[in-house]
Amino acid sequence: MSFPWFEFAGLMLAFGINAVIPGADFAMVLRQAVVHNRRAALFTSAGIAASILVHGTYTLLGVGLIVGQSLLLFNVLKWAGVAYLVWLAISALRSPPPKAPEIGANDGAATSDIGAFALGFLTNLLNPKAVLFFLALFTSLVSVRTGFETKVFYVGSMSLMLFTWFALVSFFFTTASVRQGFYRVGRWFNRVTGITFLALAFRVAIAQQR
């Protein structure tokens, strides 16, 4: 059986368009790049990409359909996501303003690789819209005749695409000229990112099952 290139291209196009739309993932990578450094932003990007593998796995196993149809499970995931985003917002609002590292110091504030990875992983994993998005994507664009191995390849490709996108975002926002612009606004950066996380928490809170 030949590889369904047309189906694959349509799936990747739909996923790619959704990936580049700014949301919680973008806000988190941006913050990691400005407040910490490129390494932290890249590990956060890797965490987001790894979360896609989890979403894809439970979708292929049919667990996503159960969550999508169960009001209780959907609400548990939804309010866990809301609580996490609110915590991120409070942390951002209480953080000191980002500033350029001193000459000879490390590039940005210190953060562990595991911690950066976990931030990205949880930011994407606890988004109930991701559950519904994967269900809609595979239901509408992937044929029931498509083999399981091919679907696994789809999920892996989506994860790689997302990491590549956020790696580019990480590199862009850690260039010296771009970071200096954020350093000049100081505490306003924390206020804007904090309010952004609160707005995203509100969007998740009002999310409904389709």
Image (tube, helix red, strand yellow):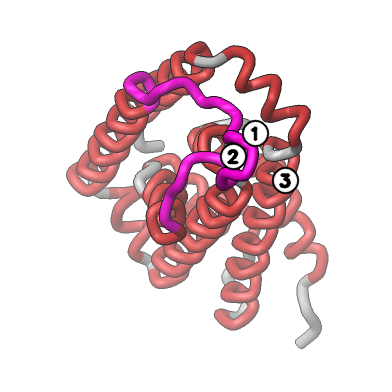
Find residue 147 and report its horizontal and vertical position in percent: 61, 80
Q: Is residue 89 left or right of residue 110?
A: left
**How far is disc 2 from disc 1 in space, using C-alphas?**
18 Å
- Identify the mark nearer the N-term, 1 or 3: 1
Q: Quadrant of residue 210?
A: top left
* Foreground tag (1 vs 3): 3
The residue closer to the viewer here, 158 or 174, is: 174
Q: Which labelled disc corresponds to residue 171?
A: 3
- Identify the mark nearer the N-term, 2 or 1: 1
Indicate whether 143 appears above or below 70: below
Instruction: Decide whether residue 103 is among the magenta residues.
Output: yes
Find residue 4 and report its horizontal and vertical position in percent: 77, 72
Q: Main secondary structure of the magenta part?
A: loop
Element carrying mark 2: helix
The residue closer to the viewer here, 164 or 72, is: 164
Q: Residue at x 81, y 63 (%)?
A: 6
Q: Is residue 203 left or right of residue 146?
A: left
Question: How crowded is the residue under tag 1: few (<14 C-alpha within 10 Å), some, or many (20+)?
Answer: few
Disc 2 residue type (three-letter)? Ala
Q: Residue at x 45, y 14 (%)?
A: 191
**How far is disc 2 from disc 3 in space, using C-alphas?**
8 Å
Element carrying mark 1: loop
Find residue 25 and report its horizontal and vertical position in percent: 52, 40
Disc 3 residue type (three-letter)? Phe
**Residue that numbered label 2 is attached to:** 33
Q: Which labelled disc corresponds to residue 119?
A: none
**How far is disc 1 from disc 3 in space, using C-alphas?**
18 Å
Q: Quadrant of residue 19?
A: top right
Disc 1 residue type (three-letter)? Ile
The single residue placed furthest to the bottom in the displayed view is 1
Tell me the magenta residue range: 92-112
